[in-house]
Amino acid sequence: MLKISKRLMGIFEQIGNGHRVADIGSDHALLPVYLIQSGKSPFVIAGELNPGPLAAARKQVRDAGLSSRIDVREGNGLSVLSAGEVDAITIAGMGGGLIRDILEEGLRQGKLEGVTELVLQPNVGEDLVRRWLVKENWYLTGEQIIEEDGKTYEILHAVRSDRAKELNDELYNPDRIQLNDGGKLSQEWLYTLGPWLVSEPVEVWKKKWESELCKLEKICIKLSESDAAESREKEAAFREEIRQIREVLDCLPTAKR
């Protein structure tokens, strides 16, 4: 049986049993092959736009003897799908803005018809994905953060629900998270930090945000070397962001391992 990375395993674990899956931006089709070999999915569409990975995906599927159950298709985003073909869609390894745009375009084209589950792994801009899910009445049922080869990845699992608005209002309610100092997290910070991740912070999550603080500090140092008024304003804004993140990290319950 094929071996897959910790990141792909995290995505695999979020997909519902028996679902027909479309893996968008499938690269070498490792996840589709594993889904079939494991018995979790009966049929997978592997969508890929770039010629190199597309050829690699076709070879991977052919070598695994799974050409009848994995359809490798060339195309951009959800254009590779027809309405009602799959139950679940996975999109991983892209920026949050691109994932949002792919979903939005697919929605306009009717490609999300029949889809009941989304498993999304943005490399950056996770808040953009969370906002889109709320806007389009998808409920974020859970979040996972993992570390592999020195990088952290957030995996978001969302489902269609008739109660999506009610559930999302509760999930992003600032009153839901109580900080140790008695304060509350704003809705904006819940979108940024992750409403589930911040509820039970783990060490990997805290490590990610400590790293973000270091990056912001370096930006501030660079900006401080400039005499331009615009640089002063940007530095002040970043300093305030650093202060707010630090305040949240210091006031959250102790991170779990």
Image (cartoon, helix red, strand yellow):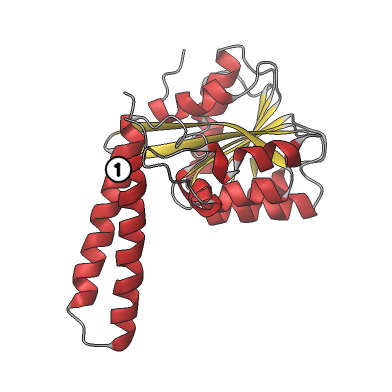
Report x, y in % for residue 52.
Answer: 48, 46
- Asked whether, in this view, residue 239 is left or right of residue 105, the answer is left
Which residue occupies 56% across, 24% down?
Answer: 14
Which residue occupies 31% across, 58% down?
Answer: 243
Q: Work out whether 246 lies above or below 195.
A: below
Q: Nearer the viewer, residue 133 or 65?
A: 133
- Amino acid on which the number 1 mark rests in the picture: Asp
Res 81 quadrant in image: top right
Report x, y in % for residue 200.
Answer: 43, 29
Q: Quadrant of the C terminus?
A: top left
Res 3 quadrant in image: top left
| Residue indicated by mark 1 | 250
Report x, y in % for residue 44.
Answer: 66, 27
Which residue is most to the front?
Answer: 182
- The answer to whether residue 76 is seen in the rendering is no
Which residue occupies 32% across, 30% down?
Answer: 254
Report x, y in % for residue 46.
Answer: 61, 35
Q: Nearer the viewer, residue 16 or 225?
A: 225
Number of other residues with Cα within 10 Å of mark 1, as a class: few under 14, some 14 to 19, many 20 or more: few
Which residue is most to the bottom?
Answer: 228
